[in-house]
């Protein structure tokens, strides 16, 4: 293989000629400069991989040349030539990035070995940096792929939950699109109430799955057109517990448990299944309770006729501090009716 280019910088013509002959006879291509400034101009133009420079020179000495050259090319392989009296200066040059220093008069074998080592070190530095860049790029690509896969997985989860919520609505007569409407109402209330963004996903899942426990309720009770008997109500009221048992062992659905388990609890402690009171009821369940009641009152059911949004808001306000968390009710009432109307309209779209 051809040897690389070497820049020789020395103010002594005889030394330049000797160095030129040494490197040329060993296959190197040579550039020659008689002082540091001239050498720096050549270095900036040619960017030789190897430079051999004297320390004591007029115009610009070897150390100043070294500093300037290293700024242009941090990977530059530079060897310092020095007399015995300048060893301290040569050692100092190592701190500024010189690969090695060699004492004059130059030993040819020592110089050539130092040149080979300097070039090898330079190649290793370049290869390591390129490897680092390649590794960082691969990490970025892998991260993007993982993010895309995670997003796709999240979208799949959400679509599955929406489909399951719709299936539950279909099974429960008169509640078509109920989960979609309550999902929209609940998120609007939660955002206005200041619920942190990272908690909204758990709320979403809980809303879409709130009645999943009803799959364990016999159709004879769930689909009964008339009033339920006390015994039938006792069975119906088990659906929050059934829902909790269904999802609590599924890792990505555990955040939905508070809504599924507690959506029938009441602020005054008269709800079920545990009779929780006030802040003992999870906030997500308190928000859902308001949204669920609002939808139940404003949409026709087999056993009840819908009332206007305004009338439903009045009724929810009346039940603050009994059925509902007063703070959540205040947030609900601060939201314009037009927003709820838009959510309802979109819930009926395909």
Image: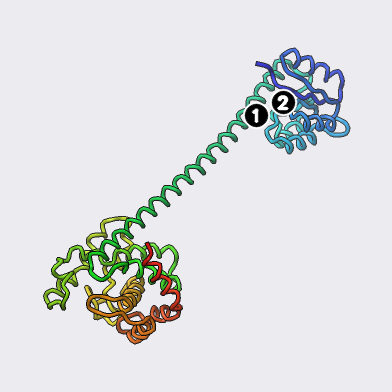
Report the residue marked by disc 2: 50
Classed neighbour count for the residue bearing mark 1: other residues with Cα under 10 Å, few (<14), some (14–19), many (≥20): many
139 displayed left or right of 295: right
**Circle 1 sits in a helix, a strand or a loop, which is it?**
helix
The quadrant in which the C terminus is found is bottom left
Nearest the camera: 313 or 189? 313
Point out the tag, 2 or 1, that comes first from the N-terminus: 2
Q: Residue 288 at x, y = what percent? A: 34, 72
101 displayed left or right of 143: right
Residue located farthest toward the top when viewing the structure as drawn = 25
Residue at x 12%, y 77% (from the top left corner): 229
Please say if the residues under marks 2 and 1 sit with CB atoms less than 8 Å apart. yes
Residue 278 visible within the image: no
35 displayed left or right of 308: right
Q: Is residue 13 above or below residue 133?
A: above
Report the residue marked by disc 1: 122
Residue 222 in which image quadrant: bottom left
Residue 349 in which image quadrant: bottom left
Q: Residue 70 at x, y = what percent? A: 73, 36
Residue 37 visible within the image: yes
The quadrant in which the N terminus is found is top right
Q: Residue 42 at x, y = what percent? A: 80, 29
């Amino acid at each position: 293989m051809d040897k690389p280019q070497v820049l020789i910088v020395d103010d002594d013509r005889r030394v330049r000629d000797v160095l030129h002959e040494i490197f040329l006879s060993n296959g190197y291509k040579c550039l020659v400069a008689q002082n540091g400034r001239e050498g720096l101009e050549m270095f900036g133009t040619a960017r030789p991989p190897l430079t051999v420079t004297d320390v004591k020179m007029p115009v610009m000495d070897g150390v100043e040349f070294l500093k300037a050259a290293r700024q242009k090319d941090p990977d530059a392989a530079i060897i310092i030539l020095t007399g015995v009296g300048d060893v301290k200066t040569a050692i100092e040059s190592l701190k500024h990035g010189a690969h090695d220093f060699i004492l004059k008069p130059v030993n040819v074998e020592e110089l050539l070995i130092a040149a080979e080592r300097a070039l090898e070190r330079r190649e290793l530095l370049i290869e390591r940096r390129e490897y680092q860049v390649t590794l960082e790029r691969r990490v970025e690509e892998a991260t993007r792929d993982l993010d895309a896969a995670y997003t796709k997985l999240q979208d799949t989860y959400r679509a599955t939950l929406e489909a399951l919520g719709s299936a539950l609505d279909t099974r429960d007569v008169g509640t078509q699109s109920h989960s979609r409407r309550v999902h929209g109402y609940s998120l609007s209330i939660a955002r206005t109430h200041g619920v942190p963004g990272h908690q909204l996903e758990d709320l979403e899942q809980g809303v879409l799955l709130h009645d999943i426990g009803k799959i364990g309720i016999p159709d004879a009770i769930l689909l009964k057109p008339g009033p339920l008997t006390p015994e039938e109500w006792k069975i119906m009221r088990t659906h929050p517990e059934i829902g909790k048992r269904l999802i609590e062992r599924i890792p990505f659905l555990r955040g939905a448990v508070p809504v599924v388990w507690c959506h029938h609890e009441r602020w005054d402690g008269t709800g079920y299944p545990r009779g929780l009171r006030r802040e003992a009821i999870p906030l997500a369940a308190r928000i859902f309770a308001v949204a669920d009641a609002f939808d139940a009152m404003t949409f026709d059911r087999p056993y009840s006729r819908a009332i206007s949004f305004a009338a439903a808001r009045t009724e929810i306000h009346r039940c603050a501090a009994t059925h509902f968390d007063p703070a959540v009710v205040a947030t609900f009432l601060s939201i314009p009716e037009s927003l709820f109307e838009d959510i309802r309209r979109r819930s009926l779209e395909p």
